[in-house]
């Protein structure tokens, strides 16, 4: 027997495999493919207070080893989520993490205020990579002060634990992580997508209507792993690794550098059973290596 359970302090998981926001819908879309209750946790698609249409198409473009997306955080808003989706999800024996978005600083607080009184949410994940309408489309994740202010005000408005999700599109990821920690976040997840673009040489047009999009998938794994390693060394709170995880081996790399759990994103779009397979591959590795408790592997990186 292998014990795959992970204790994040503010949340206990039966295994470290969590779905990444925006790649697993609202959870129920995946019921035909896997048993949702076998997952460590489910992260819901980013929610603004009101419903949003997102960006105009085309908003997906495949790249070698990954994809670019400019979905623009399409979503159903907090009211429909709490009336139509949450009642179904709360009966499942799996923690639900709600990814929180905001067009301005006040909206993050508004979303969290609205949802904090609803039953069935284990944790909020703050998506601080949302373009801010009052600040020329810049996002809070790019500034340590701005990150601090958002985390602090959200933390003051909810009793539910919060994870702050960092953007890789910065020069010094550690200073942003330290700001989030200082403001009181319970955990950190990283990375969100890397800003990129692609051009169709026949039409000479950008492949995305939005011109820029976020790169995800296996291509970004080395960047994500490096940033997770740097952040783990700097902070005292649990870190969740995200970026290019397709296999159990990928997930184990993140755990070995010190992530307490991982999120699977783009892999769900290629293989809807990916999370289930990754859990099995982690278990098989432990059995082969005679590891009885997965937590013992966390942060076991050997540097000579
Ligand atoms: C289609 C798509 C939609 C996404 N939507 C969100 C979102 O709503 N909120 C968020 O924080 N991240 C979102 N992300 C980012 C992912 O959660 C994840 O951080 C990123 O894709 C890197 O992981 P991956 O390489 O495993 O996909 C989205 C990614 C993709 C591909």
Image (cartoon, rainbow, N blue to C red):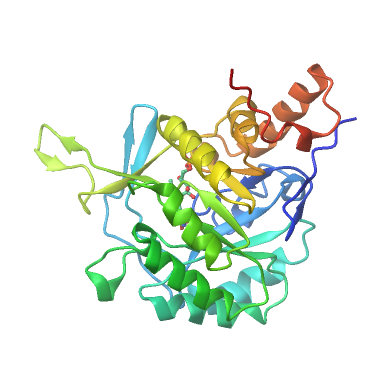
Instruction: Give the vertical position of 110 relative to 151 (above or below).
Output: below
- Residue 216 x, y percent position in the rendering: 41, 40
Q: Could you tell whether 87 is left or right of 133 in the image?
A: right
Instruction: Classify the position of the C terminus by image quarter.
Output: top right
- Residue 290 x, y percent position in the rendering: 84, 20
Query: What residue is shown at x 63% (from left), y 22% (from top)?
Result: 302
- Residue 285 x, y percent position in the rendering: 74, 22
Instruction: Let me know if residue 45 appears in the view.
Output: no
Residue sitting nearer the eye, 208 or 10: 10
Residue sitting nearer the eye, 34 or 126: 126
Residue closest to the far front: 304
Query: What residue is shown at x 66% (from left), y 70% (from top)?
Result: 86
- Residue 72 x, y percent position in the rendering: 34, 59
Instruction: Give the vertical position of 63 relative to 27 (above or below).
Output: above
Q: Could you tell whether 287 is left or right of 74 in the image?
A: right
How many marks do you count on the picture? 0
Query: What residue is shown at x 68% (from left), y 29% (from top)?
Result: 300
Query: What residue is shown at x 44% (from left), y 73% (from top)?
Result: 149
Residue sitting nearer the eye, 275 or 174: 174
Instruction: Classify the position of the N terminus by image quarter.
Output: top right
Residue closest to the far right: 1
**Residue 145, quarter of picture:** bottom left
Instruction: Let me know if residue 67 appears in the view.
Output: yes
């Amino acid at each position: 027997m292998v014990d795959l359970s992970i204790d994040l302090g503010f949340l206990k998981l039966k295994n470290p495999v969590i779905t990444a926001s925006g790649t697993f819908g609202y959870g129920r879309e995946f019921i035909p493919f896997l048993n949702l209750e076998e997952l460590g946790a489910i992260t819901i698609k980013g929610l603004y207070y009101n419903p949003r249409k997102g960006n105009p198409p085309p908003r997906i473009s495949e790249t070698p080893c990954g994809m670019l997306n400019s979905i623009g955080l399409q979503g159903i808003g907090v009211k429909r989520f709490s009336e139509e989706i949450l009642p179904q999800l709360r009966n499942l024996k799996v923690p639900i993490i709600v990814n929180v978005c905001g067009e301005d600083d006040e909206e993050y607080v508004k979303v969290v205020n609205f949802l904090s009184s609803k039953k069935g949410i284990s944790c909020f994940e703050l998506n601080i990579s949302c373009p801010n309408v009052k600040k020329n489309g810049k996002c809070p994740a790019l500034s340590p002060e701005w990150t601090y202010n958002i985390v602090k005000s959200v933390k003051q408005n909810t009793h539910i634990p919060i994870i702050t999700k960092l953007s890789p599109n910065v020069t010094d990821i550690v200073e942003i992580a330290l700001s989030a920690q200082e403001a009181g976040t319970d955990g950190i997840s990283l990375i969100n997508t890397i800003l990129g673009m692609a051009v169709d040489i026949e039409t000479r047009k950008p492949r995305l209507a939005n011109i820029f999009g976020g790169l995800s998938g296996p291509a970004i794994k080395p960047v994500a792993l490096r940033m997770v390693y740097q952040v783990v060394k700097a902070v005292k709170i649990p870190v969740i690794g995200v970026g290019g995880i397709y296999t159990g081996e990928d997930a184990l790399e993140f755990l070995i550098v010190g992530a307490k759990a991982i999120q699977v994103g783009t892999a769900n779009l290629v293989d809807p059973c990916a999370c289930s397979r990754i859990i099995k591959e982690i278990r098989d590795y432990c059995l082969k290596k005679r590891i009885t408790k997965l937590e013992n592997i966390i942060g076991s990186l050997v540097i000579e």
